[in-house]
Image (cartoon, grey):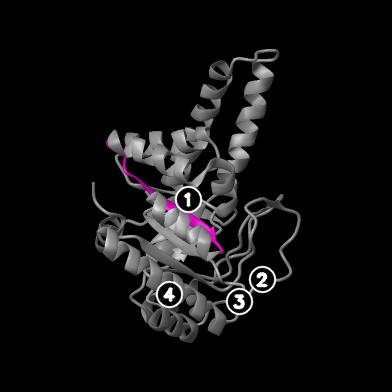
Amino acid sequence: MKSLREVLSDAKKDQHPLLHINVGSYEQLEAVAQVSQKRNTPLLVGVSEGERAAWGVRRIADLVRLYRSEGISLYLNADHTHSFEAIKQAVEAGFDEVLFDAGKLSLAENITKTKEVVDWVRGYSSAHNTDILVEGELGYIGSSSVQLDALPLDLSTHTTVEELQTFCSHTGVDLVAPAVGNIHGMLKGSSNPPLDLERIHALVSASSVPLVLHGGSGTDKKQIRDALQAGVLITHISTEVRVAWRNALEQSLTQHAGDVVPYHILPEVIDALTQTIERIVTDIID
């Protein structure tokens, strides 16, 4: 199976971006695996610090390795990691990528802390004959993959070309997630604010480091496609899958009222999640 770096290189060459989906339950992971297998396409599986703490960092890595042993092209990302210790845990568990999120800090602090992570991961990869990618976050776009009543008040201004170039040259990251009008979470009853497509074009042109679009759930899908066509390599989806999971679980519990057998209830949840993820892939990537 190809390394994640090789998959990203192919994606960039073929202009075929990748989808990154966060999971926090077995049903969500199984649905992602089914879509990857059915479509014969690689998918990135993201688990944040909170999700890893709830699930177990080695347990999720072992599960993904099991799917990969069956020929399913899943790649695992330690999403939104804020501590050096949590980075080390994910790397040692065998993750393909780690995202060190210091986006809320000043540029200088972000560079210093992110470079420490990059240097350590590079050393570990060299010593263990592996190739783990490091993503940095440049700009703050909120922190919660939830349904929002209103926009967060502490969002960053959009990432500038100068910030991107400085950040990349001083840290050596493999991927960067900028602030380009995107936010984590989904606004209730309306789409999220529009992306700054002009800024995205400028950032893509200014650096060879691939860009990652976070906060894809509540963003207009045409805007995401436009961002990907501009050269963004990966887009993240989380809240949309969480909402689908809850809705499907509630519906299945209602249909199986009084039933206490999980394997009667959960297959319908997995089916609904699979349909949701297939639709997202079709709307964004195809």
User: Contact (CB < 8 A) between labels 3 and 2?
Assistant: no
Marked residue nearer the N-terminal end (1 or 2): 1
Q: How many neighbours does mark 3 have within 10 angstroms: few (below 14), some (14-19), or many (20 or more)?
A: some
164 shown above or below 232: below
Amino acid type of the residue tagged 2 in the rendering: Leu
Q: Earlier in the sequence, mark 2 or mark 4?
A: 2
Q: Name the residue under label 3.
A: 105
Tag 4, which secondary structure? Answer: helix
Q: Is mark 1 on a helix, strand or loop?
A: strand
Label 2: element kind = loop
Residue mark closest to the camera, 2 vs 4: 2
Q: Nearer the viewer, mark 1 or mark 4?
A: 1
From where the camera sits, is residue 264 visible? Answer: yes
Type of amino acid under label 1: Gly
Residue at the front extreme? Answer: 127
Q: Measuring from the top left, give residue 174's x and y in whole percent.
A: 36, 69
Gap in angstroms between the C-alphas marked 1 and 4? 26 Å
- The magenta stretch is 71-82
Up the image or down, 272 lies above or below 40; here it is above
Q: Earlier in the sequence, mark 1 or mark 4?
A: 1
Which mark, residue 46? 1
Of mark 3 and mark 2, the one earlier in the sequence is 3
- The residue wearing badge 4 is 201
